[in-house]
Image (tube, grey):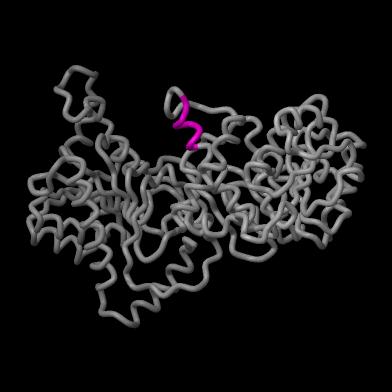
Amino acid sequence: MRAYYTVDEIRAAEAELFTRVPHGMPMRRAAFGLADVVARELRERTGGVAGRAVTLLVGSGDNGGDALWAGSFLRRRGVAVRAVLLAPERAHAQGLAALCRTGGRAVSAPASPDELRADRMPPGTLPCVRGNRDVPRPVRDLLGEPDLVVDGIVGISGRGPLRPVAAEVVAGVRCPIIAVDLPSGVDPDTGAVTGPAVTADVTVTFGAYKPVHALAAPHCGRTELVPIGLRLPMANLAALEPHTVGAGWPVPGPSDDKYTQGVTGVCAGSATYPGAAVLCTGGAITATSGMVRYAGTGAAQVVAHFPEVIAAESISATGRVQSWVFGPGAGTDSAARDRLAEILATDLPVVVDADGLTLLAADPSLVTGRGAPTVLTPHAGEFARLTGSEPGLDRVTAVRKLAESWQVTVLLKGRATLVAGPDRPVFVNEAGGSWAATAGSGDVLSGIIAALLAHGSHPAWAAAAAARVHALAANLAAHASTAAGAPISASPLLSHIREAIGTLRELAI
């Protein structure tokens, strides 16, 4: 698993590290790794290192010190380095001295943003230098003409958006940005962005990944880890590595039959929403469930799409199953509630999605206190109906609280999908895009989770692994379309789920 550690956990590990190594060594390790990444980016983006230009945006914290020390290492490789000091009187003294000794240049930013907004020339008045014709002259003078900018404005202890001067300077950057540890202005523990913040092309983090790297991946860009010798505890937030999902995905063994591979029961769809039944059932089938049994009024449509499904009109007539999924397109009337209650009264694992969540919001007693595994799969609006409030900026805490309060597994959908069970850790799956944000996509996901539960997978693992496969299938579907990278609908997901599973299994070999 890839582990993510909070600021408090990192600080505790750093304090222990400082007792084992000489003073200043962790920062120099971090800075050397940072300089190496910057040099590699220069080489890949511009074709060389020596003779290129880098501007450092330096705040008052240790990240600013990391940037200054990295600047001194880059100077030794022939890079022209300029440091913009956003808090000159509090800049890291040793790092600044090291930069100046190697020939780097330091300039101080003004204290007032008004001084940076002056002399904004209309487009076309001045020659365009790297597309910065709309940037005020004072900002251009501060930044110079860099090939790359290094963001060392705020450290992991920083909170809140960029301050006005820093925001003006960052707004004037017209080249790739490499963030030190995290993009400034983004909360390190929650990934929340409440105002001006850096959007980096690459983030270089030290010692361990932080929650921001998964929860605010669009602001971080590609994240690179530089080890500095931290000794860390078991993480409370983690991501399943792709090869781990592939290795753990159930496939038929030499003695398996259709029953031992897992029999999934699907109760979804209605006369109004027959497509939900098709999509949910399709998710279970393509996730390699040994058998899928369907109960509901959409039997004709389901069997027309998937003749291998065994269909019945009622739950009692369905036959033996090893898990249930209820909710997509199922309705919210009293008959739907009775069907949900009947399924939850069993001792089988159950996935509740869509309309099922609306029914639970009205009557939580249907599920609270249930002994068998239960997985709820809300999006933000459904989460608010279940709990009475939006997930808010701290989504990890919110999803963990619901899971512990109801003693269920909760999958909170989003680009960074979170899965929390009554025990820890919370799993996070950063999808790498939002291709799956389309109607019916969640119906497919709930079917995949149910198939894994039928096979006997742990509920949290099943939900997290299903989210990984679902996200990869969406990416594959988007890039397999006529216009590669075009938006998709939910149906093409079904034809790419097995491809996604196969891709992950290949990584495990």
Tell me if residue 401 can be seen: no
- Horizontal and vertical percent position of residue 182: 38, 53
Residue 218 sits above or below residue 32 on the image: above
Q: Is residue 477 magenta?
A: yes
- Horizontal and vertical percent position of residue 184: 37, 49
Residue toward you, 167 or 334: 334
Question: At 62% from the left edge and 55% from the top edge, which residue is drawn?
Answer: 252
Residue extending furthest front? 254
Residue 125 sits above or below residue 485 on the image: above
Residue extending furthest bottom? 20
Question: At 92% from the left edge and 45% from the top edge, which residue is drawn?
Answer: 316
Q: Main secondary structure of the magenta part?
A: helix
Left or right: residue 467 versus residue 289 is left
- Horizontal and vertical percent position of residue 71: 17, 56
Residue toward you, 194 or 225: 225
| Image quarter of the C terminus | bottom left
Residue 129 sits above or below residue 338 on the image: above
Question: At 45% from the left edge and 23% from the top edge, which residue is drawn?
Answer: 482
Residue toward you, 280 or 399: 280
Left or right: residue 488 versus residue 117 is right
| Magenta span of residues | 475-481
Tell me if residue 181 can be seen: yes
Q: Is residue 280 magenta?
A: no
Count of numbered circles on the image: 0
Left or right: residue 463 versus residue 26 is right
